[in-house]
Image (cartoon, coloured by chain):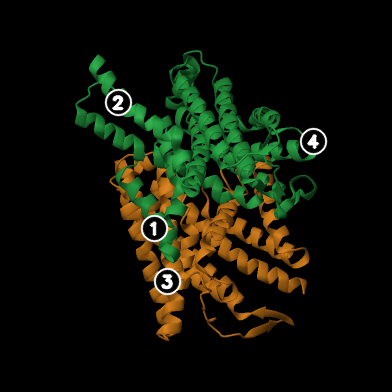
């Protein structure tokens, strides 16, 4: 046992060091990509909670994403609140707003829930585009740069800030899995009727799943807006909405690590495919199809179970 | 003027309706929300353009080619994507995302070849405008309505008069029982896909001359078709057709009298209204 732990540490420590020192030796573009990937991880982690753990369909992720981004931006721009205060406020707002939309939405199940959450996404996109006074409409709005001690923060700051928050979020999600709330959600996913029979308050845990989804995705939105320093409806269109769902399916439904893999991959894929120029859409589709065709459980989940079997693990 | 707008609205509504119709057919047979439905239209447009412009094929041959090739694309998708994943017992959500991958491959292929430029499709009767009771009606728009009627009646005939049609109806009604009487569900999914793809492909060729076809046109049509299906009641193809026509009329009026942006917003508002007021749609059954 001790030897295995030492070997694992021997691998983990250098990797951790690489991650921590990344901005110091990597160029500007890789750091940019790393931040971009981390944001995707937030979106995937959050959405995985409703889809993967609780088995609920949430086709309205863009609502939480946009709400987080825009509320943080508005708090800073129009109310002059500093970013470090705007961040928790925006997250709180997004979580509460999600709880409020849950009131009508949780009456729905199955494909009706899909339709209901989808229309939420439509409304979000429409409202952002039309509400010029507040959101700047289709022209977009600028987000003030983060200022600490009279210095404007750049990519290096965002790298460390977002990465540390991501680590916290990941730990939180892992704790959720083994918590009673997480087990309740998974019970609901497996068989809602049986869950009720066991005394689980289904509505409460479904709402909790959605709220956690809103918290994480909203946080992702806040961070995105802050780093990008610009918000526009095009970032929150139906395409992005679907892309977030693709992230968790691609990485592995119901797996936090799968969400990290899926989130990072899907966010980085367009950049990586730029070399194909005109053919990038075809290659994207081919990658998506081939991955799902051969690994329907998701990229990470399939590979993880494969390596487990190769190592001869019986327990997992 | 009003009558002309109405006519054009019905015409484009037929296209939305066909997308919704075919979308519902696939949903009934497989419970899969087919994101690639709009791209079947694209395939039809592109095949038509290739044969009409480069090879100067006669219209009738082109129509046959469009139907056959679209149908084959649908079959390929059913066999290699949907059916393959069905056999692995993957959750429906994964299959839906896989259809998105297929949609992207179709869009990407056409996009790569055309470099996302406009796809020229000559109208069947040229630029002729006919007149009915002093109302100018476009020849292509009329053709769309006629073709829609033919396609839907043909579908109805296939479903009622042929054995395989009856098998499809049985599967849509109760898949497990249909399996018990010897109907292979995967073959039904194939059939649904082939029918839907062929119909959508022809619809694409029909709408090509009066819209501005290019590689990315698929997704907006898929959304419109989806809204049409919900308007009509998810599960009833004829309802989806009517929903599509209704949607077409509303959006054409909005585009004409307000703006095209308003038309988009209006279609979303319509979807919301249906979901709140009457979730089962116009002709849907109670859940």
Q: Quadrant of the N terminus of chain A?
A: top left
- Please report the residue visible at 25 percent of the width from the left and 29 percent of the height from the top: A308
Q: Secondary structure at mark 3?
A: helix
Q: Locate residue B94, reporting x and y percent.
A: 41, 42
The residue pinned by badge 4 equals A79
Q: Chain of mark 1?
A: A
- Asked whether, in this view, residue A129 is left or right of residue A16, the answer is right
Q: Which mark lies nearer to you, 2 or 1?
A: 2
- Please report the residue visible at 47 percent of the width from the left and 13 percent of the height from the top: A198
User: Label 1 neighbourhood size at 10 Å, few (<14), some (14-19), many (20+)?
Assistant: many
Does the residue at mark 3 contact the one at mark 2 (Cβ under 8 Å)? no
User: Label 4 neighbourhood size at 10 Å, few (<14), some (14-19), many (20+)?
Assistant: few
Q: Nearer the viewer, residue B173 or A29?
A: A29
Does the residue at mark 1 contact the one at mark 4 (Cβ under 8 Å)? no
Q: Which mark lies nearer to you, 3 or 2?
A: 2
The residue pinned by badge 2 equals A10
* Badge 3 and badge 1 in a common chain: no
Q: Locate residue A243, reporting x and y percent.
A: 50, 46
Q: Secondary structure at mark 1?
A: helix
Q: Chain of mark 2?
A: A
Q: CA distance from mark 3 to mark 2?
A: 50 Å
Q: Which chain is in orange here?
A: B
* Badge 3 and badge 2 in a common chain: no
Q: Which mark lies nearer to you, 4 or 2?
A: 2
């Amino acid at each position: 046992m001790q030897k295995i732990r030492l070997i694992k540490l021997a691998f983990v420590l250098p990797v951790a060091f690489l991650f921590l020192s990344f901005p110091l030796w990597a160029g500007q573009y890789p750091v940019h990509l790393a931040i971009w990937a981390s944001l995707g991880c937030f979106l995937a982690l959050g959405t995985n909670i409703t889809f993967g753990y609780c088995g609920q369909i949430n086709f309205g992720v863009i609502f939480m994403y946009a709400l987080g981004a825009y509320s943080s931006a508005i708090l800073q721009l129009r109310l002059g609140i500093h970013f470090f205060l705007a961040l928790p406020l925006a997250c709180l707002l997004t979580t509460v707003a999600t709880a409020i939309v849950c009131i009508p939405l949780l009456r729905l199940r199955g494909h009706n829930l899909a339709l209901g959450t989808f229309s939420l996404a439509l409304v979000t996109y429409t409202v952002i585009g039309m509400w010029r006074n507040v959101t700047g409409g289709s022209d977009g709005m600028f987000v003030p740069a983060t200022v600490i001690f009279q210095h404007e923060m750049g990519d290096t700051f965002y790298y460390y800030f977002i990465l540390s928050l991501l680590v916290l979020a990941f730990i939180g999600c892992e704790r959720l899995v083994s918590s009673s709330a997480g087990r309740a959600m998974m019970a609901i996913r497996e068989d809602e009727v049986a869950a009720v029979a066991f005394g689980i308050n289904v509505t409460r845990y479904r709402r909790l799943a959605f709220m956690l989804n809103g918290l994480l995705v909203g946080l992702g939105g806040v961070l995105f807006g802050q780093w990008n320093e610009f918000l526009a409806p095009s970032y929150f269109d139906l395409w992005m909405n679907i892309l977030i769902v693709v992230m968790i399916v691609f990485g592995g439904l119901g797996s936090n690590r799968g969400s990290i893999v899926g989130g990072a991959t899907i966010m980085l894929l367009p950049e990586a495919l730029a070399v194909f120029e005109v053919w990038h859409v075809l290659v994207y589709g081919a990658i998506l199809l081939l991955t799902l065709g051969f690994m329907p459980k998701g990229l990470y989940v399939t590979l993880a179970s494969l390596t487990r079997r190769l190592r001869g693990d019986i327990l997992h | 003027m009003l009558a002309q707008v109405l006519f054009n609205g019905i015409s484009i509504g037929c296209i939305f309706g066909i997308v919704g119709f075919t979308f519902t057919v696939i949903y009934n047979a497989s419970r899969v929300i087919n994101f690639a439905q709009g791209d079947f239209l694209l395939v039809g447009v592109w095949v038509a353009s290739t044969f009409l412009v480069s090879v100067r094929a006669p219209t009738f041959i082109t129509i046959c080619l469009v139907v056959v090739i679209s149908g084959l694309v649908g079959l390929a998708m059913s066999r290699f994507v949907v059916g393959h994943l069905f056999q692995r017992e993957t959750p429906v959500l994964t299959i839906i995302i896989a259809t998105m991958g297929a949609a992207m491959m179709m869009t990407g292929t056409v996009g790569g070849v055309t470099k996302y430029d406009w796809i020229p499709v000559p109208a069947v009767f040229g630029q002729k405008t006919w007149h009915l009771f002093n109302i100018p009606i476009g020849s292509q728009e009329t053709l769309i309505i006629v073709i829609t009627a033919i396609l839907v009646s043909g579908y109805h005939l296939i479903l009622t008069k042929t054995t395989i049609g009856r098998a499809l109806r049985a599967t849509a009604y109760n898949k497990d029982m249909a399996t018990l009487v010897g109907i292979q569900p995967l073959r039904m999914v194939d059939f649904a896909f082939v029918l839907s793809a062929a119909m959508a492909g022809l619809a694409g060729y029909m709408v090509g001359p009066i819209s501005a076809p290019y590689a990315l046109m698929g997704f907006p049509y898929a959304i419109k078709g989806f809204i049409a299906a919900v308007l009509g009641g998810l599960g009833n193809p004829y309802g989806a057709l009517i929903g599509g026509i209704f949607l077409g009329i509303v959006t054409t009026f909005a585009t004409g009298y307000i703006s095209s942006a308003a038309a988009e917003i209006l279609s979303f508002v319509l979807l919301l209204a249906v979901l709140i007021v009457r979730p089962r749609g116009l002709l849907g059954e109670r859940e």
